[in-house]
Image (spheres, rainbow, N blue to C red):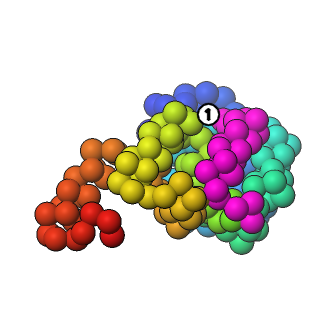
Amino acid sequence: GKVVERFPNVLCYAVENMEEHVEFLLNKVGVREDKLGKVVERFPNVLCYAVENMEEHVEFLLNKVGVREDKLGKVVESFPQVLGSLTTENMKGKLEFLRSVGVPEDQLGQVVEKFPHVLGSYTTENMKCKLDFLRSVGVPEDQLGKVVERLPQVFGYALESMGGKLELLLSVGVPEDQ
């Protein structure tokens, strides 16, 4: 229901083409069979993009980002848009931003494995706001990359939520400089 509602063109595709896409997702990407339906539900376009184009994205994720092959399926399960709706140029920009805040080159893949949405869901401006918040609460500039490396999900948190958590910590006596 949801897939057809969001992407009615799926009804026009040849079964053979969809089977090729399913095989690609399961066997080349490593999406788990029990997660395949969720991937298609989240991103029905995955059934219509040319497999060759998705292969290019897979190669980019493995060879340029550093995602480990055994983690690729989970990355796609979490954020299937990495196979098509994001351009490699857009993803390169996000990687450059991560490097600029101190995430080491050899950790970029693991950051994406932990939080694939970092490649596409957030604007650089949104990401800068989260880093500004971290600076405002005393995270030194040279430690921002380490914080992002450990918890890239910080880019997905609402600023109000982060502020509320900090206030709670302070209210229970955690020193501000800790």
Asked if the stretch drawn in magenta spans residue 79, the answer is: yes
Residue at image point 74% right, 42% down: 92
What residue does disc 1 label?
10
Q: Main secondary structure of the magenta part?
A: helix
**127 sits left or right of 49 in the view:** left
- Percent across and percent down for residue 9 are 61, 27
Q: Is residue 142 magenta?
A: no
Q: Residue 110: x and y, percent?
A: 65, 65
In the rendered view, would you say 13 is above or below 163? above
Q: How many marks?
A: 1
In this picture, residue 102 sits left or right of residue 171? right
Q: Is residue 82 visible?
A: no
Please name whichever residue, 60 or 103, is drawn nearer the observer in this view of the structure: 103
Residue at 14% over, 63% down: 171
Q: Up-down: is 69 above or below 11?
A: below
Task: Please give the range of residues in magenta.
Answer: 78-106
Please tell me in which quadrant of the rendered image residue 46 appears: top right
Residue located at (55% from left, 31% from top): 7
Q: Amino acid at mark 1?
A: Val
Is 140 rendered above or below residue 80?
Answer: below
Quadrant housing the N terminus: top left
| Image spot of residue 158 (x, y percent) | 34, 45
Q: Residue at x 27, y 44 (%)?
A: 160
Q: Is residue 165 among what the camera can see? A: yes
Residue reaching furthest left? 171
- Residue 146, relative to residue 129: is it above or below? below
Local SS, label 1? helix
